Image (tube, helix red, strand yellow):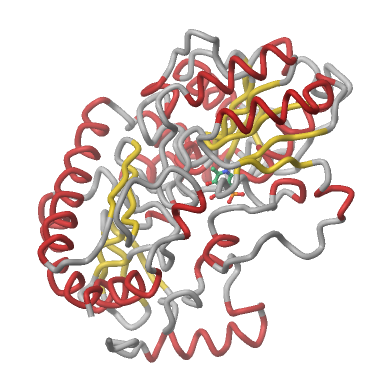
Amino acid sequence: MTPYPFDAPASQALLERALAVTPGGVNSPVRAFRAVGGTPRFMASGAGPYLTDVDGREYVDLVGSWGPMILGHRHPAVVEAVQAAVADGFSFGTPSENEVRLCEEIVARVEPVEQVRLVSSGTEATMSAIRLARGYTGRSLVVKFAGCYHGHVDSLLAQAGSGVATFALPDSAGVPKEMAAETIVLPYNDLAAVEQAFAAQGAEIAAVITEASPGNMGVVPPAPGFTEGLRRITAAHGALLISDEVMTGFRCSAAGWYGLEGPYDAGAPDLFTFGKVMGGGFPAAAFGGRADVMALLAPVGPVYQAGTLSGNPVATAAGRATLEQCTPALYARLDEAADALTAALRDELGRAGVPHTIQRAGSMFSVFFRDGAVTDYDGARAQHVPAFGAFFHSMLSQGVYLPPSAFESWFVSGAHDDAAVDRVVSAVPAAAAAAAE
Ligand code: PLP
């Protein structure tokens, strides 16, 4: 295997400058190439399904800024909305119409969400939802699942997915043990473990938080009945169910994962969190749900939550313009592109004799370099990570940008036309051969 199939001198020069002024040279760990080796590519521009790096090399982008770019880069409708918003001013620190329109759009799409509060990142959304659940129930314990990532909230970093999984960290230094003790971590897709935890401590559990369909340990959809079971158990014990749709929201369908799996006979989750797509590439996220729970938030209720840039007029304009383009035709195209890519991956990895499993949640998908279905974090970790590294570098050298980790979802956009899909498909045989070495 050739670890660095081509050099990237301009990226390397920027990395050296970056290393001097920011830890690891990156402002979010998942952007580093530590898990796969080599120089992270510094991108200069994006257009449709393509990214161009500072060395002038073009890549088909299957990261999509880790989810937000559902329309591809620089979609004209979003550019127009952002330019119009910027022309009116950047931030007022007052309510503005753009935020009302974005909230209305979210409430209209996700039926159980009666009220929503805007924030600037998915981390803020889950952190605030947890505080609200604690305020509502007067309890403090929170159940999360191993391999699920909910942002870098102190109490939610235990056995988390995303970068925490990529770098094989059990949890994070700097989280007080008292705080970690407030979190019960259970195996994903294991309702018996949830039953047991509630039998032991049900009266102290404020909430169960789950990725609606996990994408941060690779794509591991809930087993049929799992989410429904969570709803039944939490309701029986007076705990809230928080469905984290930061990644899946408005991506898996117009109403996110809920739109594919819901409504549930046992009832809807109490709270939802959103981010990524709803900001269209700008910092906008949200949490929302039952009006009686949301009524506990300041200034109406006693649970405090705030943000200088929450509901920023430019970010909310970008988000609304993006959601307006999230039509049935867009979701059909995302599915078509994902169908074509997963079929090619399955064929070529099979032909090359590389053990693999491809899992999907709507158009989100990932490849596990192992045989057999993956249902939880232990299963995700049981893959052959070096095979992913070889596959990744072969794809990169052929102009395809994948997440630099075996534990992430891959994302397509509405801009991934046949030409972009064909470029990826034609790169797969050599990458499969590299993974087989
Ligand atoms: N929740 C989920 C499911 C996520 O995938 C992420 C980010 O990847 C977050 C929360 C945190 O969002 P942010 O990175 O915007 O803080």
Picture residue at 29% right of the left edge, 79% below the top: 56
Residue 394 position, x and y percent, is 24, 76
Q: What x and y, as percent, mark residue 183?
A: 76, 42
Give whichever of 53, 358 is nearer the camera: 358
Seen at 35% across and 28% down, the residue is 253
Q: Position of residue 305 (x, y in %)?
A: 80, 33
119 sits to left or right of 131: left
Figure check: 204 above or below 157: above
129 relative to 397, above or below: above
Residue 364 versus residue 428 in the image, above or below: above
Count the numbered circles shown. 0
Which quarter of the rendering shows the C terminus? bottom left
182 horizontally vs 414: left or right = right
Residue 24 drawn at (x, y percent): 61, 79
Q: Quadrant of the N terminus?
A: bottom left
Which residue is drawn at the image coordinates 39% and 52% (left, top)? 409
